[in-house]
Amino acid sequence: MKSRALIALSMLLVSATAVASELRVLRVDGGARSVRAEAAAPLLPGNLVLNGDTVTLTPNSRAALQLAGAGLITLARSAELQVFDSRAGTPALGRFKLLSGTARIDSRVGSGRVPLDVRLNVGSLKSRIYGAEALGANDAAGETLCLLAGAIEIQTSGAPDRRLDSPGSCLRRAPDGQVRELRLSEDQPMRLALSSSEFAGPELASSNSHPSPTPIIAPVSKPGVAPTANNSLTPVASLPVAAAPATAKAGSWTVVVLSLAKREAVESRSQALLDQGLPAATRQIEVKGQIMYRSTVGSFQSAEEARAYAKTTLATAGIQGWVSPL
């Protein structure tokens, strides 16, 4: 009887270990759920995503997840992400598979300034994203991984392993099985994937409570803009930051496309918009005592004008944003 109790307790402990998780939901825009063993539950901010779960998003939804209290995993475009393992440690470890949609991984800073170690499989492309930022997409164009900052290693079945260390470089396995390199700046599907991975809505607090190293995020330039001789895009200089007034002036409105506590990432986004010929700027605001940075486009006399601009010019370019007073 005692041995049976011990066996039962051991099985319970193993089961608990199997579902232990360090992956927490930061924010959800739209419909999302977690699925485990045929059972589904709504994905809500503050929830833990258990090991073995599959996170599923409805079209036009977004979700932001945090691994071990640091890093950021952003899902979009009907994403389906299988969670195999998420645990704290030095470094913290995450193992995921992107079945469909878009996933953006920022593993540059973990707890105690030790980078996160994230393994992301996009279809048959198996990547290690250690202290780097990458964008993955699994869609009609194929299975694609792009480097945004740092360097990543990619294993490909039936093809030589690759290492991406030039920001803006990508590797894609097309539906016909062919593997080729491409540039994020020249590929419209991945440009749209990048845009979809940025939240449009109220501020998303920085996922990293510790100062991060200066990231090297390549600006997304216009198609036809040639990369530099070393096949990488030239890092942008810091843009001037316009401080937002405490009280907005009457009749002064803009469209916000990105708002984060990370100045460098917002500046990079503003530069990308400028490269597309859009009147972008980086602005500094304070939200509940925290300094935030916004990438904004345009200055309009009314909210209606700003909203119309967002629905026409920006929507045509695949850019989403929300209207806010200056």
Image (cartoon, rainbow, N blue to C red):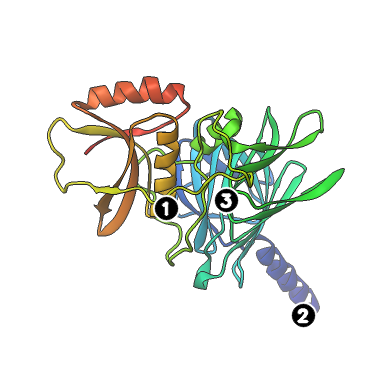
Q: Nearer the viewer, mark 1 or mark 2?
A: 1
Residue 296 % position (x, y)? 33, 38
Gap in angstroms between the C-alphas marked 1 and 2: 60 Å
Q: Is mark 2 on a helix, strand or loop?
A: helix
Q: Which of marks 2 and 3 is in front?
A: 3
Instruction: Give the quarter of the figure containing the N terminus.
Output: bottom right
Q: What element carries label 3?
A: strand
Residue position for label 3 = 105
- First reached walking from the N terminus: tag 1 or tag 2: 2
Inspect this view and state whether residue 124 appears: yes
Residue 80 % position (x, y)? 63, 40
Residue 221 % position (x, y)? 50, 35
Q: Residue at x 45, y 47 (%)?
A: 236
Q: How crowded is mark 2: few (under 14 residues within 10 Å), some or many (20 or more)?
A: few
Gap in angstroms between the C-alphas marked 1 and 3: 16 Å
Q: What residue type is labelled 3?
A: Ile
Gap in angstroms between the C-alphas marked 2 and 3: 47 Å
Q: Which amino acid does label 2 sit on?
A: Lys
Name above or below for residue 91 compared with residue 252. Answer: below
Instruction: Give the quarter of the figure containing the C terminus.
Output: top left
Q: Do the residues labelled 1 and 2 touch (CB within 8 Å)?
A: no
Left or right: where does residue 217 sit relative to residue 170?
A: left
Left or right: where does residue 48 sit relative to residue 35?
A: left
Q: Which amino acid does label 1 sit on?
A: Glu
Residue position for label 1 = 264
**Residue 2 shows which numbered tag?**
2
